[in-house]
Image (tube, grey):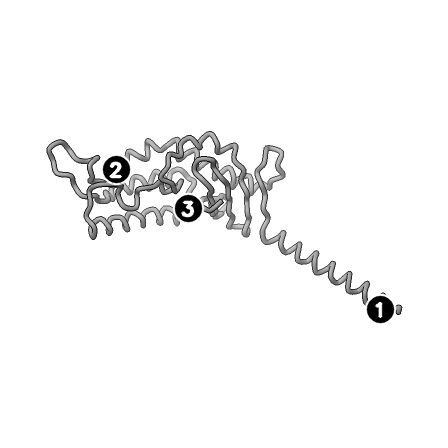
Amino acid sequence: MKRKVIYILFSILFLQSCQNKDKSQLENNSIDKVDLDEKSDLSNDSKEQITLVKGFMKWYINNMDMLGKFDVIGGGPMDAKENEEVENYYVDFKEAEKYILELKRSGFLTDNLLKNEEKSFLEADKYYKENPENDGPPYGFDYDHFFLTQEAFEEDLLNIDKSKYVVNQKDDFNSEVTFVLPISGSYKYSLKKIGTKWFIEKIESVMK
C-alpha cells in the first residue's frame, strides 16, 4: 500500500514537472501581447515594433501625394494628349527608381521588401510588352501595394492609434504584428531586427 502511495505521488510530481517545462518552452518561443492602452505591460521590443507599424502607416498616408507624383506607369488615357493616340502602358524605370528611393528614405522598410516592390515593376513591364493595353486599370497596379486594397483607406489614418495590436515575437530577430483597421481590413506585418532596430519585412492582408 505504501509503495502504491509513493508511486502515485511520484507520478503527480513528474506530470507537474513536464507541464512546467512545456509552459516554460512555450513562453520562451512565442509571447503574444496586446496593445490595449498606455498601461499595457509591453516590453520595449513590443513597443518599438508597434510604434514602427503605426509610424509607417501614418507616413505612407501623409505622403501619398508626394509618392503619387512619380509617374511610374506611363501610357493610358491619363497620359494621352489632345488629338493624340493613346499610348500603351509601360513602366518608367527612372521614375520607379525615384519612387523606391523615397520609400527607402522613410527608414521603415527592409531592402528585401523594396526588392520585392522593384520585382513587381519588372513583372508589370514584362506583362505590358506581352499584352499591350492602354485602357482600364494597369495590370498589377489596380490596388495599393501597402494597404493591399482597391478601396479608399485614407480615413483609417484616424483609426491607427485606436486599433489593437498583437505582437508575436518569434525570436530575437523576427516578429509579427497583427491588427485590424475598420476600413482597410486585417493585416499582418512581418518584422526583422537589423542591428538594434526593427524594420518591416513583409505586409500581408489576412482573414479576420
Q: Residue at x 20, y 52 (%)?
A: 130
In the structure shown, which secondary structural element does the residue marked by tag 1 occupy?
helix
Q: Which residue is mark 3?
A: 110
Identity of the amino acid at label 1? Lys
Nearest to the eye among marks 3 and 2: give it.
2
Q: Which mark is residue 151?
A: none
- Left or right, residue 79 beside residue 109: left
Q: Residue at x 29, y 42 (%)?
A: 97
Disc 2 + disc 1, Cβ < 8 Å = no
Q: Which residue is mark 2?
A: 71
Identity of the amino acid at label 3? Thr
Q: Position of residue 201 (x, y in %)?
A: 43, 47
Earlier along the polypeptide chain: callout 3 or callout 2? 2
Relative depth, front residue between 181 and 197: 181
- Left or right, residue 45 beside residue 142: right
Q: Which residue is mark 1?
A: 4
Q: Position of residue 5 (x, y in %)?
A: 85, 66
Identity of the amino acid at label 2? Asp
In the structure shown, which secondary structural element does the residue marked by tag 3 occupy?
loop
Q: Residue at x 24, y 44 (%)?
A: 91
In the structure shown, which secondary structural element does the residue marked by tag 2 occupy?
loop
CA–CA distance in space, label 3 to label 2: 23 Å
Q: Position of residue 77 (x, y in %)?
A: 20, 36
